[in-house]
Amino acid sequence: MSDVELRRRILRFFAEERRAPAPAEVGATRDDYLRLEQAHALVLGADGAIWIANPFSGVRTGFTAESGGERWDANCAWDALGILAALGRNGVARGTCSDCDEPIVLEVRGGELVEAVAVAHFLVPAARWYDDLVQT
């Protein structure tokens, strides 16, 4: 299977099961996951499990996308919105501001962000995100 097809399987699994798949659950091997990590399609933990498959997170981060009673872990507020967009669902992106510790609640209805007041802050320039994507 191609890397593109494998990535689709991984993202589909996240969408349907709301958790990261083990390699065998998507017809892959550990080496396949390592190859996708080298291509910046995944971030793996020390145990080889998926930490990040944008926009999904394989670990709890405090950021979620919620829709129809289902919840997906996201890497940040932006990715929580990305999950709702990728799934074509109405819902709520939730998290906590790392600056002021206030709750972040962003609602999506009909494919549109409901009016909200928020500021996005990126710690490093986009060109350096993959230097340490977990910290970014």
Image (spheres, rainbow, N blue to C red):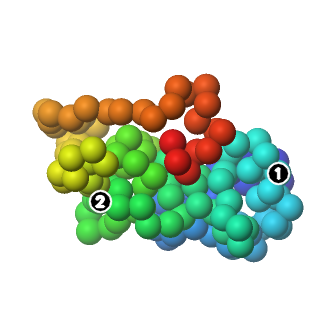
- Taking the image as shown, residue 37 lies to the left or right of residue 9, namely right
SS label for mark 1: helix
Q: Quadrant for residue 30, please give it.
A: bottom right
Expressed as whole percent of the image width and height from the top left, the position of residue 21 reads 63, 69
For mark 1, what is the residue?
35
Where is mark 2, residue-wise? 66
Please tell me whether residue 99 is drawn above or below residue 11 in the rendered image.
above
Q: CA distance from mark 2 to mark 1?
A: 31 Å
| Mark 1 surroundings within 10 Å by alpha-carbon count, few (fewer than 14), some (14 through 19), many (20 or more) | some
Rendered location of residue 72, percent (x, y): 40, 62
Residue 5 coordinates in the image, percent (x, y) = 73, 49
Q: What residue lies at 36% left-to-right and 33% top-to-bottom?
A: 121
Question: How many numbered tags mark residues here?
Answer: 2
Which quadrant would residue 107 be assigned to in this image?
A: top left
Q: At 45% from the left edge and 35% from the top edge, which residue is drawn?
A: 123
Q: Compared to 25, does 90 lie above or below? A: above
Q: Looking at the image, do the residues carrying marks 2 and 1 touch, with CB atoms under 8 Å apart?
A: no
Observer-nearest residue: 4 or 78?
Answer: 78
Residue occupying image coordinates x 71% and y 67%: 46
**In front: mark 2 or mark 1?**
1
